[in-house]
Image: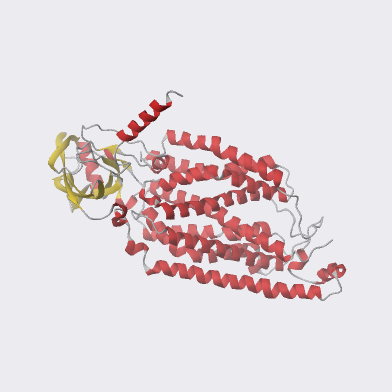
Amino acid sequence: MRWLPALALLGALVCTARADEHSHKYTDGEEVVLWFSTVGPYDNLQESYDFLSLPFCVGTKEVHHRHESLGEALLGVQLVNAGVDIKFKEDVLKTEFCTKEMSRADVNDLREAVQNKYFYQMFVDDLPLGAYVGEAEGDNISFFTHRHFNISYRDDRIIHVKITTGDTLALPEKGTADPVFRVPFTYSVTFTETDEPFENRFNKYLDRDFFEHKIHWFSIANSFMMVLFLFGLVALIMIRTLKRDYARYDSEQGLLDLDRDLADEYGWKQVHGDVFRAPSRLSVLSAFIGTGVQLVVLAISIIVSAMAGDMYLERATILTATIFLYAFTSFLSGYVSAATFSSYSGRNWVRTMFLTAAFWPATVAIVANIVNFAAISIQSTRAIPFGSMVAIIAIWLLVVFPLTFIGYVVGKNFTKLPNFPCRVNPIPRPIPDKIWYTQPAAIIGLAGLFPFASIFIELYFVFQSFWTLRIYYVYGFLFLVFVMLVLVTACVAIVSTYLLLNNEDHRWHWISFLSSGSTALYVFGYSIYYFVTKTKMHGFFQTTWYFGYIGLLCVGLFLLLGTVGHWAADKFVSRIYRNVKID
């Protein structure tokens, strides 16, 4: 215990010695660090390479790599200190900070980079900067050797940083350069005082004309009108159709005649003895529902946190928060999966528990490894470091799996025995032939259209943000769209379930899940359209990256919406059969 004061003092000294970009406060003459990040083609922003993979150089002033967070490492963010001498509020005239000896191969690499519009990124005080490697005019190709930084400040804080490039150096024709020649790289810095407050310093990076366009409000109105329409449809089913059926039952002599009446009726009343039968592949459905509930909670938590805390201000903060929130909500997935499995008297609980704990992490791991091999093949920074892989595996082994197991044990032991309104017949009732549009495949295919129609405009904004340099910040819009997506999905699941039961088909468990989750197929179809018409992406890696992670998004959306739909259908079925209880 006597060492605690000394350790506390050492910790304070260490925190004081850290780069001031962490506190965003500087004293006059204090060092301002310029970080070089990645470089890659502007049209293929996900195809990023280490900055020094091109024949650039850094200064000799304490050059080191920055330790990235887990999210930054997974996104391929690699920061290297530029080694230039920048002091707060001290201008720097044009100064050479390094010299690069270029070979013929270096010149050829630079020519190819300029022709492919290579774009490099930098950071100063966590503010992003970017510039092209060079410029091409016909056969004349040149690259920039000078960078000028205009840094705006207020009091002891940096508000804006602007970069301009200059001093173009013409590159010789490919294969005709001298074996080695020396290229000096220079920089200059100007500090300018501003009255803009520190809280607004990211406003210049936010494309308000794009994200706050009236079309965004139109998407909200479109979703809201669809919610009203589907609510009206559900109300029509619940109030008119079912109420009329119940009134007919009440007019009969009594409950003793109910079996005789049901034998003479058609529709949803006929399947009262099979509607609460355990669904096929109960283990898989339970694992899907448990994972889906966890993803619903995760999505709401991330969106609300982003709304409250402006998480877009820090690199990869959302990804890092998502990983740890998923890990610590694993208890919930285990509990819900066990509750679902036990409610239908499932027996093989060990398999269900392992499936719940492993399905989503295994899906993510498969996609990430496929993309990782593609990244390694081109030596991209998008390749996940081995240390990050070990960290993710450790999180699953030490947090996700134990919490899922604990949640499953609690759910299994505290779930009440099934008490369904209707007795389950020992022999399943045959399912009659139906019209084509009441077939399960047709219901599943058509049901996903309505939720997709409520979000497809917002999808465009999300895709534009993720696949371009735009920063997505309108999380209030996203939250409203998400809420209405959940409501539309629930209504569609109820209508689909009623249509299915009314045609004497009792297989509502999987149909409600699949019909709600089929929205993910429409999202994937839209992603193909977006890839072909809205992007300039090309190449094996870019295509693998795009469709790999879009596919992962769609799997998560399938589980999330499928769970919402199954929950709504379960409540609907329990409600309508409550007055048709058979002794």
Q: Percent from the top left, x then y, of residue 457?
A: 44, 64
Q: Is residue 274 left or right of residue 219?
A: right
Residue at the top extreme of this rendering: 2
Quarter holding the C terminus?
A: bottom right
Q: Looking at the image, which residue is at 43% across and 70% down?
A: 218
Could you tell me if residue 261 is visible in this image?
yes
Could you tell me if residue 141 is visible in this image?
no
Between 41 and 391, the residue placed more toward the observer is 391
Q: Percent from the top left, x then y, of residue 100?
A: 18, 35
Q: Is residue 431 left or right of residue 65?
A: right
Q: Is residue 121 above or below residue 428?
A: above
Between 9 and 149, the residue placed more toward the observer is 9
Q: Percent from the top left, x then y, of residue 251?
A: 82, 76
Q: Looking at the image, which residue is at 67% across and 57% down?
A: 509
Q: Looking at the image, which residue is at 33% across and 36% down?
A: 66
Q: Is residue 35 above or below residue 242?
A: above
Q: Looking at the image, which residue is at 20% across and 35% down?
A: 59
Q: How many marks?
A: 0
Q: Is residue 337 left or right of residue 65?
A: right
Q: Is residue 297 left or right of residue 537?
A: right
